[in-house]
Image: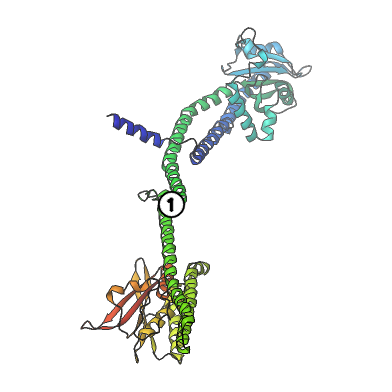
Amino acid sequence: MRETVRRIRAFLRGLAPRASSRLAQLILMANFVALGVLVVGMLALTETRRGLVNAKLDSLRSQGELIANVLAEGASDGIPAPALRNHDARALLRQLYVPAEARVLVFDKGASLVADSHLLADVFETSELPPAGADPAGEGETSDALPVRLLDGFADILRSPEERATLNRDLRDEVRQAIAGGIIAGVRREADGRRVVSVSIPIQHVRAVVGVVTIESYDLDRLIDADRQALLPFILIAALVTGMSSLALTVFIARPIRRLARAAHEARRAGGRRVKMPDLGARNDEIGELGVALSEMTDALYDRLDAIESFAADVAHELKNPLTSIRSAAETLPKAKDDIRRGRLLAVITADVARLDRLITDISRASRVDAELAREDVGPFDLGGLLASLAEAYNETSSNQTPVLFESQVRNSRVLGREGPLGQVFRNLIDNAITFSPQGGKVYVTAVRGQREPRETMLIMIDDDGPGIPEENLEAVFDRFYTQRPTGAAFGTHSGLGLAISRQIIKAHGGRITASNRRDVTGACLGARFTVELPAAPAH
């Protein structure tokens, strides 16, 4: 039981994101910044909802016009001059119904207050006094007011210049503008910071302005606060979901990437020792693809290191043989008693020097194959035309006594590859076939269509009439420095790197090359066959 609990705790600790994980920090930061922008925008835009303010203004305007018409009919005179009867205005306002959330103020044409619905209805405003000894000036700077002020400031950015001017207008300015003629409506801010939806309507006796009715509503802040409070549960749920998603992203992204990074650092410090990459192939996502790619890349690098070590060992072995022969001949040369023996020893030295030169040239060429292939661009070209040109060139060479016959069984023989290196491959194979062909033999080059999922391929077969290849050496012929030659061939004239280089080039093109023997119905060997398979170029 304790062991199970310990394993569960260890598993949970492994799931927890580390503070040092920059990816985890970036995920959390990005999620919460996006959430913060969304929340601030929702809260700030709540305040700028045109529909709420416009509905309130329309309601107040309808009520104000009704009160202004009543006062114009029952509390104004036109003789000797248009004027408002203050006493009658107060009496009429006392009899009119004013909603609890609204306040009606009546001014004469001199902008002096005539009547106040709150005073007439004995409605008084109350507010809490600060504690004894507290600074009244700092009372408004509470922590609760700070978020509201921040949101108000953000909302001011979204307002038009006209809306900001209206918000900063005071009651006296509004009344003076109404006395000048016209209805003034908008949202303004009181001295204590409250927002007031206000409509000022002139009281007109016929056409003369005798006063102003201002109707105000103080419940805009309450409505906005109610909207914000209604959003609070959704904000909390969004924050919880964001936190959980961030944790999940950290667990499923940061942890495997951290494992891959550790394995990569370990491989770098291993000094050539093979380090197994984490197995993420079961993940069907980009992290799994990254793990598989990194594992394949490290395996390829290890294989390349092994190949370089093996190549270096093979080169040292191959160079050692002619060097040993040269040293032996050089040591024996002073002891030779006649010109015939000295001539033989010099011939041995000359042949071994030529062999060394050939080996070094082929070794240098083999070591540059990968670099040369990387520099050349891959593109479609006509492989059939290349093979036909090679066959024609061999047949026109006077020193070649073995005919090269080319036959193509495909209409479109275009392949994807590099024409220069592939031409070198087929020259190596044709040269090899000519070398093993007997007197009067022929070399056959045949191109046919092949298929290897998921695409079509080109199969090129190079056949000779020679003795064939021993069955146990069908794969060994592609090894470096494999130099089994036909009877009577001069020793040391071949480095044994031609087929190895050919396979290297074909593999770099995504193809393959194999060796086999051609046999008749009785099983007798008719000659050797080298088959090259290359990806065909897509048809246009």
Q: Closest to the observer: 57 or 431?
A: 431
The location of residue 212, given as percent across then percent down, is: 70, 21
Q: Position of residue 447 (x, y in %)?
A: 37, 80
Q: Tell me if 133 is positioned left or right of 401 in this view.
A: right
Image quarter where the N terminus lies is top left
Q: Give the residue number, with chain letter if any, for mark 1.
A: 290
| 217 and 82: which is toward the camera | 217
Residue nearest the viewer, comparing 289 with 435: 435
Above-or-below relation of 131 to 441 = above
Specify whether residue 537 is in view. Answer: no
In the displayed structure, 363 sits above or below 336; it is: above
Q: Is residue 238 above or below residue 415?
A: above
Under tag 1, what secondary structure? Answer: helix
List x then y, in percent, for residue 369. 48, 70
Who's the residue at 21% across and 83% down the image? 521
Quarter-of-image position of residue 463: bottom left
Circle 1: is it few (<14), some (14-19), or many (20+) Cα within 10 Å?
A: some
Residue 451 seen in this snapshot: yes
- Location of residue 7 in the rendering, given as x and y in whole percent from the top left corner: 33, 34
Q: At label 1, which amino acid type do we have?
A: Leu
In this view, which residue lies farthest toward the left?
A: 522
Task: Determine the residue positioned at 29% across, 77% down.
Answer: 470
Classify 135 as above or below 479: above
> Is 517 left or right of 67, judged from the image as shown?
left
Camera-side residue of 349 and 70: 349
The answer to whether residue 493 is left or right of residue 201 is: left
